[in-house]
Amino acid sequence: MGAERFEPLRRVSRLFLSFLELQVPMVLGAFVCFLLGRVTSGSSSLATTYRPGTYVFAIGDVLFLTVPVVAWMLFRGRGGRYSGEMALAMLAPVAAIALVGELAGYPYLLWLVSGMYPAMSLGMSVLLIYRRDRFIGPMNRASRSATAQQ
């Protein structure tokens, strides 16, 4: 009876740890993107195309934040379908911001540089909560037991 009382807390903590686990590759991708921006600022030809406020920079930022998360999920055995869902969940808020910005005629690209990370994290957390059974449910326990048997 005592263990059942703490089950909701365990599930929430597992979900939070899954979120943190996916934030690590996202932070590393953001760091690589930051370094790339610093390196290209010295080159005049690259600096004109790859700088904050350009479409090339926004697309690069999206790739540097999404690809490491997807790669980590594939490495951890989550499968292509779940990794694709995560990529879609991360890209959806950014696409919504871009669409609204284009339709309204606002200069959103500079804001997107600083707002992209929180927007993508929000999309990630929404998917984690919506599909929590995939991250803290039977699939997670099965993958742990399969790994323990090897």
Image: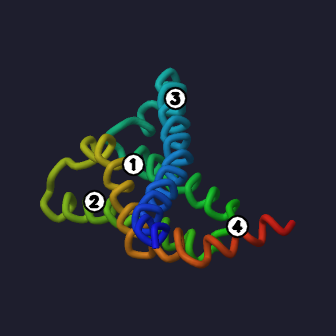
Tell me if label 2 and label 4 are in contact, CB under 8 Å: no
Q: Which residue is mark 4?
A: 144
| Real-space CA distance between mark 2 and mark 4, rounded to the nearest whole angstrom | 39 Å
Image height of 46 relative to 129, above or below: above
Mark 1, mark 4: which one is toward the viewer?
A: 4
Which of marks 2 and 3 precedes in the sequence? Answer: 3
Report whether 94 appears left or right of 111: right
Q: Could you tell me how far apart the alpha carbons at marks 4 and 3 are, in whole angstroms?
A: 43 Å
- The amino acid on which the numbered mark 3 sits, given as a three-letter code, is Thr
Q: Is residue 91 left or right of residue 108?
A: right
Q: Is residue 37 visible?
A: yes
- Residue underneath mark 2: 98
At label 2, the amino acid type is Ala
Q: Position of residue 85 (x, y in %)?
A: 49, 73
Distance of label 1 from label 3 (alpha carbons): 15 Å
Point out which mark residue 40 bears: 3
Q: Nearer the viewer, residue 43 or 28?
A: 28
Kindly identify which residue carries mark 1: 58
Task: Give the residue at the far front of this rendering.
Answer: 1
Residue 74 percent across, percent down from the top left = 66, 64
Left or right: 116 as drawn, with respect to 128: left
Q: Residue at x 47, y 25 (%)?
A: 41
